[in-house]
Amino acid sequence: MEIADRRTPAPNLAGLAEYARNLTADTPRAVLGLAGPPGAGKSTLARALVERIGEGAAYLPLDGFHLSNAQLERLGLTARKGSEPSFDVWGYVDLLRRVLDETGRDIYVPDYDRTLDEPVAARHVVPPAARLIVTEGNYLACDLPGWRDAYVFMEECWYVEAPGDVRQVRLVERQLAGGRDEAQARDWVATNDDPNGELVEKSRDRCRRILSTIGMDMFNSQQ
């Protein structure tokens, strides 16, 4: 199937949520992955889907598997925070395995705190009632060690995109909110976020559906 046949320029959230819910029709629990470049709107879409579906869905962000700043410094990756090697991919793989295997108990999920600039434990929970797990992150569809192991746990993986100029605005604003000045923010985007996005773009063809967040209904009031 060609990418053009999979593209959804301005999807309706209700329709996407119903389609996502149906991924659990033949299984006790399913994982839906949302991949895509930085600033595309993955986390906003993931949270919106979970909210729309309700107690039958739960959120599992890859950002909770950022390495700590201490580990990044040890590995010489401080200037490449957010890049593919700056995540605990094997910890992420293990958690995906757990949420599919252990359906009868609460499973706690880490997240990333932009104020602390560090990952935090147990911010989210996957309760037994959750049949659809929506996970999102840049590298979910990448054909690389660890990431391909995560990919096999996903019932489907969708690619979330937005025009480059829109992503640039979002990414610069994100860095400004984190305390960088204008020049520092633009330099970070150019030297870190942009190369990360180029790597992620190579995984596009491995995704079942291509979604543009421009015009998507839940983006009318927020980015």
Image (cartoon, rainbow, N blue to C red):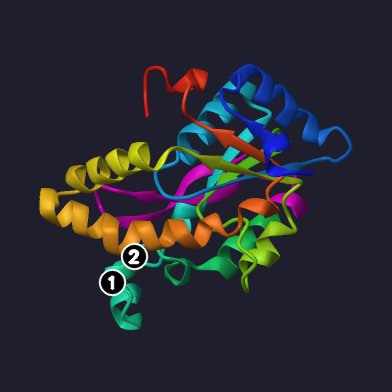
Q: CA distance from mark 2 to mark 1?
A: 5 Å
Q: Which residue is mark 1?
A: 78
Q: Is residue 159 visible?
A: yes
Using residue 126 as the reference point, say whether residue 65 is left or right of it: left
Instruction: Give the residue displayed 32% in from the left and 62% down from the top.
Output: 192
The residue lying furthest to the right in this view is: 26
**On screen, residue 72 above or below 12:** below
Q: Give residue 203's position: percent from left, percent from top.
A: 61, 57
Q: Is residue 86 in the magenta section? A: no
Comparing 104 with 28, the one in front is 28
- How packed mark 1 is, by other alpha carbons closer than 10 Å (few <14, some 14-19, many 20 or more), is some
- Bounds of the magenta segment: 99-128
For label 2, the SS is loop
* Residue displayed at 42% across by 61% down: 196
152 sits left or right of 115 in the view = right
Say left or right for 93 vs 219.
right
- The location of residue 164, given as percent across then percent down, is 39, 43
Does 142 appear above or below 30?
Answer: below
Query: Residue 186 versus residue 121: which sits nearer the camera?
Result: 186
Residue 128 visible (yes or no): no
- Amino acid type at mark 1: Thr
Name the side, left or right, on which 206 lies relative to 114: right
Which image quarter holds the N terminus? top right
In the image, which disc is placed on residue 81? 2
Q: Which kind of residue does numbered mark 2 sit on?
A: Lys
Figure quadrant of the C terminus: top left
> Residue 80's spot in the image, x, y percent?
33, 68
> Which of the two residues, 148 or 73, is positioned nearer the viewer here?
148
Picture quadrant of residue 78: bottom left
Q: Residues within 10 Å of mark 2 (few under 14, many from 20)?
A: many
Q: Residue at x 68, y 65 (%)?
A: 148
Residue at the spot 27% in from the left edge and 70% down from the top edge: 79
